[in-house]
Image: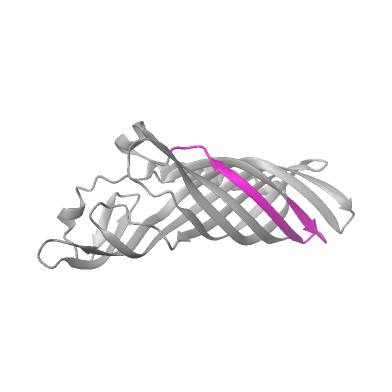
Amino acid sequence: MKHFKAFLAIAVLALAGTGASAKVGIEAGYMNMNYSLSGEGPMINNPTMNGFYVGVSDDMRLVAGLGLRIGLNYSYTMDKSAKSFLDGFSSIGASEKDHYLNVPLRVRYNFTLVPKVLKIQAYAGPVFSFGLSHTQEFDVSVDMGDGGISGTLKYNYYSGKFKSDAIDQAQLEDSDLPAYKRFDAALGGGVGIELLNLIEVKAGYDWGLTNRLKGTFADTASCKRNMFYVTIGLRF
């Protein structure tokens, strides 16, 4: 809860400056998210997840072509080919899903190539994120020596707990799997173009700064979230 309050504080402070805005906009696009793992410790997936994000943003002009852009967006990514991370389980049709709220804070520079027709831009800065949900779900079969059982299994990366429609919860709670922190921060940048003072296309990349793992796993291993995106938007 304290991380969520911190995230809300960042969002409120970021959006509080919109009174000095030059342009507001809406945008949507493709997002690729990957988790990079280093160190020793938990048996964990290292997925590459694909999806989309949608959001709003506001520009604050500083001087000449230099300004700030503040945004708020929702992202959803998934990996349909995730593998089971439990010993003794075989998985079929596994999938991993990730939902986030993100607040990017960018320093941005615009350069006009053709007045009222074409601008190019470059930007850089941090992104603060709050995880809404991160789960892995798959159909499993377990050999219990008496014919076995099968069913659907879902693991919650934030709570570190399982839900299952067929497998005894007691069997799963001792699996000692990693769990993630909800709050995350990254740093990155990108480039883009603006057409007719209305249509914007951009691409960028953000490198994770914080270790997603929590608990004892964070002492020996690190898992960071990196993001690539391509978007199209409208500026008003």
Specify whether 164 is left or right of 83.
left
The residue at the far top in this view is 219
Front-lying residue, 168 or 197: 168
Residue 201 highlighted magenta (yes or no) = yes
The dominant secondary structure in magenta is strand
* In the foreground, 5 or 227: 227
Compared across the picture, whether 199 is left or right of 75 comes to right
User: Residue 169 appears at what percent x and percent y?
Assistant: 18, 57
Position of residue 230 measured from the top left corner of the image (x, y, whole percent): 64, 57
The image shows residue 102, relative to residue 221, as above or below, that is below
The extreme right residue here reads 115
Q: Quadrant of the C terminus?
A: bottom right
Occupied quadrant, residue 28? bottom right
Q: Residue at x 47, y 47 (%)?
A: 35
Tell me the residue at 15%/66% (across/down): 148
Q: Quadrant of the N terminus?
A: top left
In reply to whether residue 71 is colored magenta, the answer given is no
Q: x, y percentage for residue 27?
A: 64, 60
Q: Residue at x 25, y 58 (%)?
A: 89
| Rendered image coloring scheme | one colour
Q: Which residues are magenta?
A: 192-211
29 sits to left or right of 80? right
Q: Is residue 191 above or below residue 230?
A: above
Residue at (63% x, 40% y) in the render: 125
Q: Left of 127 or right of it: where is 110? A: right
Image quadrant in which you'd find residue 178: top left
- How many labels were placed on the picture? 0
Expressed as whole percent of the image width and height from the top left, the position of residue 59 reads: 70, 49
Q: Is residue 224 above or below residue 152?
A: above
> Which residue occupies the foreground of this view, 98 or 66?
98
